[in-house]
Image: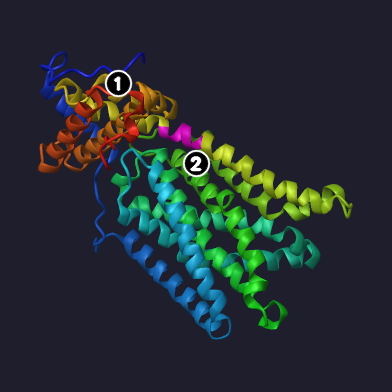
Amino acid sequence: MTGISTPPGPLAPSGPDLADLDDARVRAIDDTGWGAGVRVFQPRNLALWLWAALVIWGAVLQVQRWTASAGYYAPTLSLALVAFALYGAVFWWFTQHIDRYAAQPVTFRLMAFLWGSVAATWVFSAPANDAILSLLAKAFGTTFALEWGAGIAAPIDEEWSKGMGLLLLIAIAPHLVRTAFDGFILGAFIGLGFQILEDIAYVLDSAPTQFGADQIGASMQTFVVRMASGIGSHILFSAIFCTGLVLAIGRPQQPRRLGPGIGLIALAMALHGTWDAQGALLHAAIGDSDLLPFAQLVLMVLLPLIGIAIVIRVFHLAVAGEREFVRPLLAPELARGVVTAADVDAAAGDRKARKRYRNHGRGLGHRRRNRHVLEAVFDLADELGRARGEDTARVRFARAEVTRLRRRTDEPHVDGDAGQGDPGPSR
């Protein structure tokens, strides 16, 4: 891309007939579920009833646990609820931010979060963990179960309990889960719910240390460790696992790829198992060496970094096909002169393409305006998806915003204009 060419006014339609482009856009919207919602009331959908029953059951178990602890450890519980709510809000924003293409409805994301937070945790994982640990203790002894039990049990029951939530969500709204990227995003929200509730449980479990005399101080170490390690934990594992699950079963716009799907499922479970069994692995490798504390610290830092590198790679693989749907969505707008070829290339491109688009121009003012134009193009794509390509008032407003911001981009300016009376459009 050598530059951002912006015509002075609307272009006359050329190339393929506009009606054909509009029809192709509607097909792309239908194929991706872009802008579609989820019907919460489906009395004949057994999957929805099952999801609701298990979420309610898990919520009851959660409330019972908190009620039992509130009388003795109310300060710790209050601190954990507030702190991890803020912590979760940051991850919620980030996960929503990366869902640029055919974004999942808020209600659907909330359903994924609720499954991970109460159903996957208390209905399935907690009792399954106890059962597997008991079997391991009977088969191989208590010491083996204590050292290796978490690394063996958690990848099996926790990942599959979260994956079960994705399968229910597919049955509830199949039109919203059509690609591996949809599995990635929903898996991340399921993992976020699981992560938050598990972190609160760990903090509460640490409060009775020193007989609860200094419950805040006793739980602070656990609190810090759980927050620091959260970025490389359940959110990451579930995003990879659910991406693999969608690949393994196939979807309307995602051809079934059993090998890569099983590979990603196994990879997520391996990452989870290694994280939970890192103490046992180090002890088996170096014994009671003086280097053990240092090795534990190195592994605690290294494993999340490896996981983050892997999940970034999985994200790029999953989102590649999703980005291509932007082109037919914006093709009629390109033919009508609302957007430019550079706009479409940036919106359908990867991070490097968007960075090139934003950074083109003279000075910070121009680059800032480029960023606003690109965000307006994404907003237009979202509105077109919600309207299924129809010319609604919101679509017309989004088009007008692209035009308005582009005129400001084309205005003459100098490098220093960013802070001299031209703050640029506020978005």
In magenta, the rendered stretch is 314-319
Count of numbered badges drawn on the protein: 2
Give the percent coordinates (x, y) of residue 283: 82, 53
Predominant SS along the magenta part: helix
Any mark on residue 262, and which? none
Which is nearer the N-term, disc 1 or disc 2? 2
* SS of the residue under disc 1: helix
Residue under the image location 38 percent in, 28 percent down: 354
Q: Residues within 10 Å of mark 2 (few under 14, many from 20)?
A: many
Relative to the observer, which residue lies in front, 361 or 253?
A: 361
Give the percent coordinates (x, y) of residue 22: 15, 28
Residue under the image location 16 percent in, 33 percent down: 399
Tag 1–tag 2 contact (CB < 8 Å) = no
Residue named by callout 2 = 244
Residue 324 visible in rendering: no
Q: Is residue 31 above or below residue 224?
A: above
Give the percent coordinates (x, y) of residue 264: 55, 40
Quarter of the rendering occupied by the C terminus:
top left
Q: Does the magenta stretch include residue 369?
A: no
Q: In this view, does 340 lie above or below 99?
A: above
Q: Which amino acid does label 1 sit on?
A: Ala
Q: What residue type is labelled 2?
A: Gly
Residue 143 visible in rendering: yes
Q: How crowded is mark 1: few (under 14 residues within 10 Å), some or many (20 or more)?
A: many
Residue named by callout 1 = 342
